[in-house]
Image (cartoon, rainbow, N blue to C red):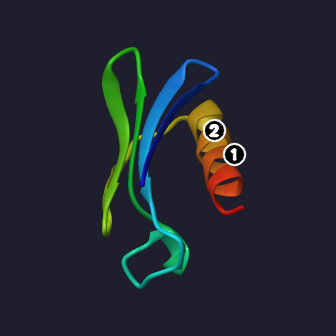
């Protein structure tokens, strides 16, 4: 299932499953995650980390996304 949203100006798209997987972030349910700010991709995970260019505020948003989608 795809989930999209925005937190503090950071837009995200995530693909989440009902159960965790070896391909998920930290073995969890999110297998794909893209975070953008002002149209620029800052974080990309597609069954493995592609790149992470998040600033301090972006890392806070990343943690919020993981917490929210882990429920």
Q: Nearer the viewer, residue 22 or 61?
A: 22
Under circle 2, the secondary element is helix
Tell me the CA gap for discs 2 and 1.
5 Å
Mark 1 and mark 2 in contact (Cβ < 8 Å)? yes
Q: Nearer the viewer, residue 52 or 9?
A: 9
Q: For residue 56, which quarter of the picture? A: top right
- Label 2 neighbour load within 10 Å: few <14, some 14-19, many 20+: many
Q: Nearer the viewer, residue 54 or 21?
A: 21
Q: Residue at x 52, y 26 (%)?
A: 10
- Residue where numbered disc 2 is placed: 61
Q: Is residue 10 left or right of residue 33?
A: right
Q: Is residue 29 left or right of residue 35?
A: right
- Percent of width and height locating residue 15: 40, 55
Quadrant that contains the C terminus: bottom right
- Residue where numbered disc 1 is placed: 64
Q: Residue at x 69, y 50 (%)?
A: 68
Quadrant that contains the N terminus: bottom left
């Amino acid at each position: 299932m795809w989930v999209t949203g925005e937190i503090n100006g950071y837009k995200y798209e995530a693909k989440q499953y009902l159960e965790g997987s070896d391909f998920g972030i930290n073995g969890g349910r999110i297998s794909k995650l893209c975070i953008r700010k002002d149209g620029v991709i800052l974080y990309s995970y597609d069954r493995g980390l592609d790149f992470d260019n998040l600033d301090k505020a972006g890392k806070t948003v990343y943690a919020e996304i993981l917490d929210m989608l882990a429920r």
